[in-house]
Image (cartoon, rainbow, N blue to C red):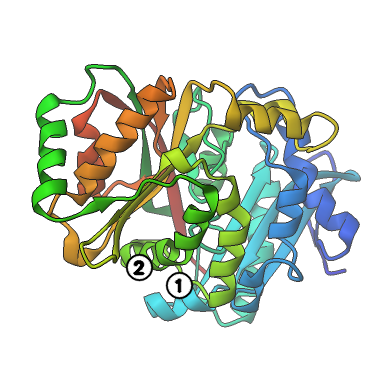
């Protein structure tokens, strides 16, 4: 166990240790449950899922991106946590010497925050890194970005919630803005999608020789999963924070997520030659269900999650979408947007939630102009030279 003792506030010295034992890793995962116990906006992840994500034996990301977990103690109690991630694929892609940080949670104490960042920075310098950025995960399937606006809103399951004071702690530690993500909320109404846009989508399907796949059984969706993952990497490769995935990671995410998708909420467009050229994945919101589960599948967590997936759920989360570069500007996005709107009305969804979109990604943000919407959350990636 590595320990870093740092002079703390009046309550006592701050000790930062690396969480290496199973108990310490579980303490790392469970710390936010206590920190946000009385916060109505906090959505706790499943403890088992977090333990798997942070396990080198189970998450193939560790093969190319080693990570270290740190816990801060003061007067015998945990007061903060942080993960350092040395992503070799990210550094190769960006030609950088950067250490990523993630899973940052902390009491409102500047010295605790500084101790946590110092622990990650010490490892980063030892590894020859020059900068720290975050919060990130291992790749785009992990949560990223610190909430800086929209603290009264409920997050999606793919995003963090954090207290407003986090930004002050991070800035006081010498970090500056790297880039922001924005999130949107839309309303589903019978007259909410322009008839002209619907007619245009039909013409594109007819004249451009595209085909919208109708999944009649779940196994048909699973059969296309590898092609969807390949297209995901192709369409997201140029975006900030996208990290190339290994074959093992692709298979890991297919097995982890695709079996739980609702086939009516996955839109896939293929060309006349059978090539997957566009995809849009949405799913019923699990935020309220996870709040009721309180981090546990048993005894009642599984019931709440299944109910959110199968029973009436007023909120639809938009997860991922992409169009192959050679088919952009040809109406593929319009085909999928129009059909997901139709499906949302049929399934009686009332609101749609986007996941984070880069503030500079004006093309994807333009999609929201087709319906009634509001930008209601903003989150930030920070950078610091070390």
In the image: residue 82, left or right of residue 96: right
Q: Residue 102 placed where, x, y %?
A: 60, 56
In the structure shown, which secondary structural element does the residue marked by tag 1 occupy?
loop
Q: Nearer the viewer, residue 171 or 187?
A: 187
Which label is found at residue 92?
none
- 241 or 316: nearer the viewer: 316
User: Which residue corresponds to mark 2?
Assistant: 237
Viewer-nearest residue: 23 or 373: 373
Residue 213: image location, x then y, percent? 34, 50
Q: Nearer the viewer, residue 251 or 291?
A: 251
Crowd band around label 2 with a 10 angstrom C-alpha radius: few (<14), some (14–19), many (20+): some
The answer to whether residue 14 shows anywhere in this view is no
Q: Which residue is mark 1?
A: 244
Q: CA distance from mark 2 to mark 1?
A: 7 Å
Residue at 40% in and 68% down: 230
The answer to whether residue 259 is above or below residue 317 is below
Tell me the residue at 51%/62% (across/down).
139
For the residues labelled 2 and 1, say whether their Cβ atoms are less than 8 Å apart.
yes
Left or right? Give the position of 291 relative to 177.
right
């Amino acid at each position: 166990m590595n320990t870093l003792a740092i002079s703390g506030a009046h309550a006592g010295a701050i000790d930062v240790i690396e969480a290496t034992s199973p108990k310490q890793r579980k303490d790392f995962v469970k710390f936010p449950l206590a920190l946000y116990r009385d916060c109505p906006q906090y959505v706790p992840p499943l403890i088992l899922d977090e333990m798997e994500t942070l396990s080198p034996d189970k998450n193939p990301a560790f093969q190319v991106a080693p990570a270290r977990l740190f816990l801060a103690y003061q007067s015998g109690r945990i007061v903060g946590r942080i993960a350092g991630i040395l992503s070799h694929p990210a550094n190769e892609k960006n030609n950088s010497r950067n250490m990523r940080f993630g899973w940052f949670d902390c009491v409102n104490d500047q010295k605790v925050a500084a101790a946590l960042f110092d622990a990650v920075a010490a490892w980063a310098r030892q590894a020859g890194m020059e900068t720290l950025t975050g919060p990130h995960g291992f790749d785009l399937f992990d949560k990223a970005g610190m909430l800086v606006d929209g603290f009264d809103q409920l997050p999606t399951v793919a995003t963090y919630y954090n207290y407003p004071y986090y930004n002050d702690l991070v800035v006081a530690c010498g970090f500056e803005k790297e880039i922001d993500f924005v999130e949107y909320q839309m309303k589903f109404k019978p007259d909410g999608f322009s008839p002209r846009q619907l007619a245009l989508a039909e013409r594109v399907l007819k004249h451009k020789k595209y085909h919208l796949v109708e999944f009649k059984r779940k196994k048909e969706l699973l059969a296309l999963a590898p092609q969807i993952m390949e297209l995901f990497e192709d369409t997201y490769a140029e975006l900030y924070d996208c990290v190339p995935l290994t074959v093992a990671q692709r298979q890991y995410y297919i097995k982890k997520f695709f079996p739980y998708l609702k086939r009516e909420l996955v839109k896939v467009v293929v060309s006349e030659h059978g090539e997957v050229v566009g995809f849009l994945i949405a799913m019923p919101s699990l935020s309220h269900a996870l709040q009721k589960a309180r981090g546990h599948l048993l005894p009642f967590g599984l019931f709440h999650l299944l109910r959110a997936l199968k029973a009436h759920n007023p909120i639809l989360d938009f997860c991922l979408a992409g169009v192959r570069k050679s088919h952009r500007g040809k109406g593929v996005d319009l085909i999928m947007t129009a059909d997901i709107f139709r499906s949302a009305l049929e399934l009686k969804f009332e609101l749609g939630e986007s996941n984070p979109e880069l503030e500079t990604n004006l093309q994807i943000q333009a999609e929201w102009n087709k319906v009634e919407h509001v930008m209601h959350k903003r989150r930030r990636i920070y950078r610091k030279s070390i």
